[in-house]
Amino acid sequence: MTVRWLAALALLLLASCLAVRDLVDDRAYFERWVAATPERAAAFSRFEAQLQAANVGDVVPAYQLWMVDQLRPECAPERFWIPPEEEWSRIVPALVFIRDHVRPVIGEVRVVSGYRAPEFNACIRGAPQSAHRQYQALDLVPLNRALTRERLIELLCPVHAAAGAQANVGLGIYAGVRFHIDARGFRGWGSNYHRTTFPCDGARRADLDDGGHGAT
Ligand SMILES: [Zn+2]
C-alpha cells in the first residue's frame, strides 16, 4: 500500500515538473521568437494593449494566445504565429467568460489551441466551420494536473448551464481534460464533436443546439 502510494506521489511530482518545464520552455521560446523581428515585437505590444484595454490582459499569459495547436505536429511547422490583426478582438468574449466563470471554479488554465488558419484547421481535422478559424475559440487544459476529468465535468457543466446562454458560449469537452470555449452560440458537444457525447447531458437535458457545427 505504502509503495503504491509513493509511486503515485512520484508520478504526480513528475507530471507537475514536466508541466512547469513545458510552460517555461514555451515562454522562453516565444520570447526569442517574438524578438526575432521588429514586426513581431510591435504586433505583440499592440495585441497586449488591446487585451488590457478590454480588461482581459491577465486571463491567460498573452503569448499563449498565439500558440499553434500541436495536436498534429506534422501540421504545425511553427510553434507560434500572429493571428490576423483584424480578428484579434474576436477572442475577447471567450476570454471574458473564462475570466468570470471558468477560472473561478477550476483555477488557472493553459491554452493549447487558439487561432487556426483554414488550411491548418483542415490539416488537424478540425470541424470545417470551427470557431477557431475566426479566432473566437480556445482549447484549454487546467493548470492543476490533479484535477480529474470527472471533477472537471462536475465543475464546468453547472457554470455553462447557468451562464452560457447569456454569454452565448459553446462548451466542448474532449478526451482527458482538454476542453473548448467559444462565444459563437450556446451549445455543447463531447469527444465526437457532436451533442450525443456532451458529458453535461448526463445530469441535464436542455434545449441546446448540436455543437457539431462549431466544434473543436
Ligand atoms: Zn476548440
Image (tube, rainbow, N blue to C red):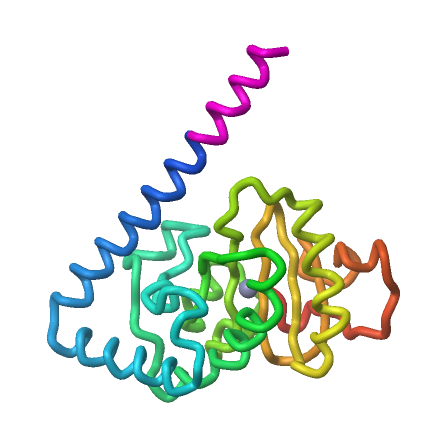
Front residue of 29 and 71: 29
Q: Which quadrant would the N terminus be assigned to in this image?
A: top right
Q: Residue at x 42, y 30 (%)?
A: 14
Magenta span includes 7:
yes
Residue 212 image position (x, y, % from top left)? 69, 68
Q: Residue at x 71, y 83 (%)?
A: 166
In the displayed structure, 23 sits above or below 43; it is: above
In terms of image quadrants, where is residue 173? Answer: bottom right
In the displayed structure, 215 sits above or below 10; it is: below
In the displayed structure, 113 sits above or below 132; it is: above
Q: Which quadrant would the C terminus be assigned to in this image?
A: bottom right
Residue 104 image position (x, y, % from top left)? 59, 63
Residue 138 image position (x, y, % from top left)? 51, 67
Report whether 99 appears left or right of 165. Answer: left
Range shown magenta: 1-13
The overriding secondary structure of the stretch rendered in magenta is: helix
In terms of image quadrants, where is residue 214? Answer: bottom right
Q: Quadrant of ligand 1?
A: bottom right
Magenta span includes 156:
no
Q: Residue at x 58, y 15 (%)?
A: 4
Report whether 193 appears left or right of 35. Answer: right
